[in-house]
Image (spheres, rainbow, N blue to C red):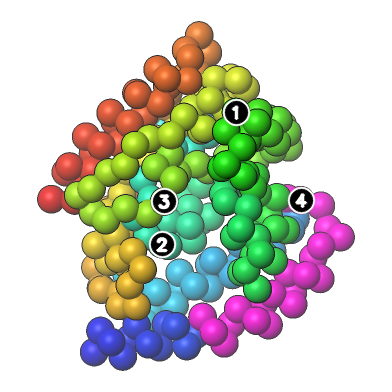
């Protein structure tokens, strides 16, 4: 049954995405925030399919910690689930991502029109400075900025080195940092066709003020909070 339900989800994805991408392209002349609201409707449809076809639901704790100003989100990355669900859970946001993702047919078109911050990881400090410039512009435009500090998806119970990019952006713009932990990888595993029914648990931590703190300190504080919560959520 899990195989059948997973197959039905992928079928829905294949049927919905191409025509929706045509709608997305038609939104290109619209203002950034309007484009975002239209394009994020695709994520809402996919989440609806996940809930109805695969039985994946979620529970969010800590919404009261969300600041009233645009912030930098530093989150665990275990699954494709969070790239969809965050569009419903948080205010309008842009994602820091590998520029290669924008080259993907259909999916990349939508990403490109959501005003992301693409980076070339091979450029080191130059990439950080470019991210800071674009990130500051997006924050001024009212967007939050989503960063997965480990850089890629990790399996539940594992971790990678937290990169400084998101914390560096916060330190250079003064934006607060919102740490996020979750266990979505238990239900939509990394690189897996199968999706397992259950309730994703997600925790939003108290905002970390960046004023007067350097990137290393901000990054360490976010990592300590996230990984402490992950030990509970992944157990």
First in sequence: mark 1 or mark 2? 2
* Residue found at the far right of this picture: 29
**Whole-percent x and y of residue 193?**
34, 78
Tell me if label 3 and label 4 are in contact, CB under 8 Å. no
First in sequence: mark 2 or mark 4? 4
Tell me if label 3 and label 1 are in contact, CB under 8 Å. no
User: Dividing the picture into quarters, in which one does residue 3 lie?
Assistant: bottom left
**Whole-percent x and y of residue 227?**
25, 37
Number of other residues with Cα within 10 Å of mark 4, as a class: few under 14, some 14 to 19, many 20 or more? some
State the extent of the magenta-drawn residues as a range. 13-33
Number of other residues with Cα within 10 Å of mark 1, as a class: few under 14, some 14 to 19, many 20 or more? few
**Prevailing secondary structure of the magenta residues:** helix
Residue at numbered disc 4: 32
Which disc number belongs to residue 204?
Answer: none
Measured along the vertical axis of the image, is residue 6 above or below residue 115? below
In magenta stretch: residue 91: no
Residue at 40% from the left image edge and 26% from the top image edge:
219
Disc 4 to disc 1, C-alpha distance: 28 Å
Residue at numbered disc 1: 125
**Pair 1/2: label in front:** 1
Disc 2 to disc 4, C-alpha distance: 24 Å
* Residue found at the far front of this picture: 122
**Whole-percent x and y of residue 12?**
49, 85
Number of other residues with Cα within 10 Å of mark 3, as a class: few under 14, some 14 to 19, many 20 or more? some
Measured along the vertical axis of the image, is residue 18 above or below residue 95? below
Q: Nearer the viewer, residue 115 or 142?
A: 115
Residue at numbered disc 2: 81
Residue at 51% from the left image edge and 33% from the top image edge:
166
First in sequence: mark 3 or mark 2? 2
Disc 3 to disc 1, C-alpha distance: 19 Å
In magenta stretch: residue 29: yes
């Amino acid at each position: 049954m899990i195989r059948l339900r997973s197959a039905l989800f992928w079928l829905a994805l294949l049927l919905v995405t191409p025509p929706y991408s045509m709608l997305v392209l038609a939104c290109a002349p619209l203002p950034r925030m309007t484009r975002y609201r239209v394009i994020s409707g695709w994520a809402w449809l996919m989440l609806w399919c996940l809930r109805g076809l695969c039985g994946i639901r979620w529970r969010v704790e800590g919404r009261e910690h969300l600041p009233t100003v645009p912030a930098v989100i530093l989150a665990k990355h275990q699954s494709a689930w969070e790239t969809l669900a965050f569009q419903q859970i948080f205010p309008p946001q842009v994602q820091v991502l590998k520029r290669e993702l924008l080259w993907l047919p259909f999916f990349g078109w939508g990403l490109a029109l959501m005003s992301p911050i693409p980076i070339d990881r091979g450029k080191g400090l130059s990439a950080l400075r470019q991210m800071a410039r674009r990130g500051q512009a997006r924050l001024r435009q009212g967007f939050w900025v989503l960063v997965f500090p480990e850089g890629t998806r990790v399996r539940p119970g594992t971790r990678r080195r937290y990169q400084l990019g998101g914390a560096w952006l916060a330190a250079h713009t003064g934006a607060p940092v919102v740490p996020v932990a979750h266990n979505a990888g238990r239900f939509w595993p990394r690189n897996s066709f199968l999706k397992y029914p259950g309730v994703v648990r997600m925790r939003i931590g108290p905002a970390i003020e960046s004023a007067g703190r350097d990137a290393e300190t901000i990054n360490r504080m976010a990592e300590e909070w996230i990984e402490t919560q992950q030990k509970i959520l992944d157990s």
